Structures are given as C-alpha cells and as structure tokens.
Image (cartoon, helix red, strand yellow):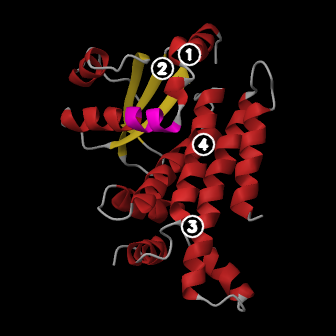
C-alpha cells in the first residue's frame, strides 16, 4: 500500500474512533492526514516525472522543494480549467483540503464535526480514484510540473 | 475574519434557493491561510434527508450549487464548502468552544 492510501485509511479510522461524541483531536488529525495523502500523492507523481526511480536520494531532495502555497495556486487554476474531469476534481479537492488542514492544525476557534471530516476523506478517495485514470494525460503532466515550477 | 453582514445578497440567495435537503446555510468571509480572499460555506443538511443526501454525487451537486451561487452574487473569491448535519450543528451551538 502506498503512503497516500495508508494516510486515507488512517483518516477514516480517526473519523470513526469515537462512537458517540467525536474528539476534536481525532477529527483534526483525520483532516490533516487526508490533506497529506493528496500532498504526497501529487509530489510523488510529480517527482517521478523529473527523475528516474533509481535516484531515490535526489527524488527525496526534490520532493522537499514543493511548497504548499504554490501547489494551491496551481491547483486552483487547474480546478476550473477545461480538461480531464479527474484532474479538475483532484485539483479542487486539494485546494479545499489545504485550507481545511490549516484550520485543523492551527485554528483552535474552528470546530469540526464527524460528517465534515468524513466528507473530506470520501472526497479525497474519489479524487485519487479519478486521478488514476488521467495521471498520464498531457494536461496532468503539465499540472504536475507546474506544481513545482509554477505556471508555464 | 468576519461574518458576512446579514442579510446580504449571498445569504438571501442561499436561503431562498436552497435545495430541499438543506436545512440552512452558514457563511463567512475573510482571507484564507495563504492570504487570498475567500468565502466559507457550511451546508447544514436536514437529518431526515440522510442517507440519500449524503451520497458523494449529492454532495458534489450541492457543492457546485453553493459555488455557483457565490459566483452569481458577483463574488470571485475562493469558496470553501463543508457539510454538517442539523443535529451536528445544534450540538456545536449548544457546546461552547
């Protein structure tokens, strides 16, 4: 299983951990895990475009160069552009999740409900499935490259 | 961050045109974590509308409805949509943060 699959599984478990009143700590971690599932999926796929698999140390270094802010800006642009539906869905979910993750991790005035967190996990899973069908499309490859270098 | 002054055109439109599965819609305006202007929308689903309204397709349609309503109100900001059930929302309102 990949890291992103494991993170989504973890998020699901956290959402259902408390049978009655879900703890904010668990819901917040669930949302954070869901965001990072997509983050690592996209970074991994993008890095694979730049470097062959044999060069793992350099891949890890390159992965650290991606910034959340730039990824959000690029994803926002692609979320409304014409192109494969799987790409626009993943881009849209990524943008929403980044903001949700920031609130979950840092904004103690925000409160989350189980349904709210579950919605994000389900949406992320749907986006991952849709992405798998379009990840080698020309538009998808352009999107991945832009996540690192900015708008081409 | 501040709530939209109520009633605003957006609040009124969301309230008047809300689908049957939606109990109410809460909104907030401000800047998001990367400094972009944004609108937050919480779609509160009627408990009785579940589980049908909880399907992925239903939620995506509601998401698009909310985002389209924001755009047609002349607001070009990023729009973040979340879902809660009415019972969840009432629980939050009963419990202090």
Q: Residues within 10 Å of mark 2 (few under 14, many from 20)?
A: many
Q: According to the image, label 3 marks what residue?
A: A42
**Circles 1 and 2: CB distance less than 8 Å?**
yes
Q: Residue at x 71, y 57 (%)?
A: A5
* Secondary structure beneath label 1: helix
Q: Quickly name the residue at label 1.
A: B89
Whether residues under marks 1 and 3 lie with C-beta atoms below 8 angstroms apart, the answer is: no
Say which residue label 2 marks. B44
Q: Nearer the viewer, mark 4 or mark 1?
A: 4
Check the residue under mark 2 and report the chain it is in: B
Q: Which residues are magenta?
A: B56-62
The quadrant where residue A38 appears: bottom right
Task: Using the image as rendered, state which of residue A134 and residue A8 is in the foreground.
Answer: A134
Disc 2/disc 3 C-alpha distance (Å): 31 Å
Q: Share a chain, discs 2 and 4?
A: no
Where the C terminus of chain A falls, by quadrant?
A: bottom left
Magenta part mainly helix, strand or loop?
A: helix
* Mark-to-mark CA distance, 1 and 3: 33 Å
Q: Is residue A46 visible?
A: yes
Earlier residue among tags 4 and 3:
3
Residue on which disc 4 sits: A122
Q: Is residue A112 visible?
A: no
Q: Nearer the viewer, mark 4 or mark 3?
A: 4
């Amino acid at each position: 299983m990949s890291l992103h699959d494991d993170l989504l599984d973890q998020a699901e478990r956290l959402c259902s951990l408390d049978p009655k009143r879900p703890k904010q700590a668990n819901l917040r971690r669930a949302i954070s895990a869901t965001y990072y599932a997509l983050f690592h999926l996209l970074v991994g796929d993008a890095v694979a475009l730049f470097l062959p698999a044999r060069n793992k140390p350099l891949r890890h270094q390159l992965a650290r160069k991606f910034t959340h802010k730039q990824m959000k800006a690029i994803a926002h642009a692609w979320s409304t552009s014409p192109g494969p539906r799987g790409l626009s869905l993943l881009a849209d979910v990524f943008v929403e999740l980044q903001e949700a993750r920031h609130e979950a991790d840092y904004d103690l005035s925000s409160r989350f409900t189980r349904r709210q967190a579950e919605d994000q996990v389900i949406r992320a899973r749907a986006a991952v499935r849709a992405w798998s069908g379009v990840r080698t499309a020309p538009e998808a490859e352009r999107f991945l490259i832009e996540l690192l270098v900015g708008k081409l | 961050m501040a709530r939209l002054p109520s009633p605003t055109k957006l609040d009124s439109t969301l309230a008047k045109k809300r689908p049957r599965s939606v109990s109410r819609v809460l909104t907030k305006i401000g800047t998001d974590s990367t400094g972009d202007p944004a609108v937050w929308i919480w779609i509160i689903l009627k408990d009785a509308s579940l589980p049908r309204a909880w399907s992925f397709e239903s939620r995506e349609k509601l998401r698009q409805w909310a985002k389209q309503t924001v755009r047609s109100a002349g607001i070009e900001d990023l729009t973040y949509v979340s879902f809660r059930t009415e019972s969840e929302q009432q629980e939050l309102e009963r419990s202090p943060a």
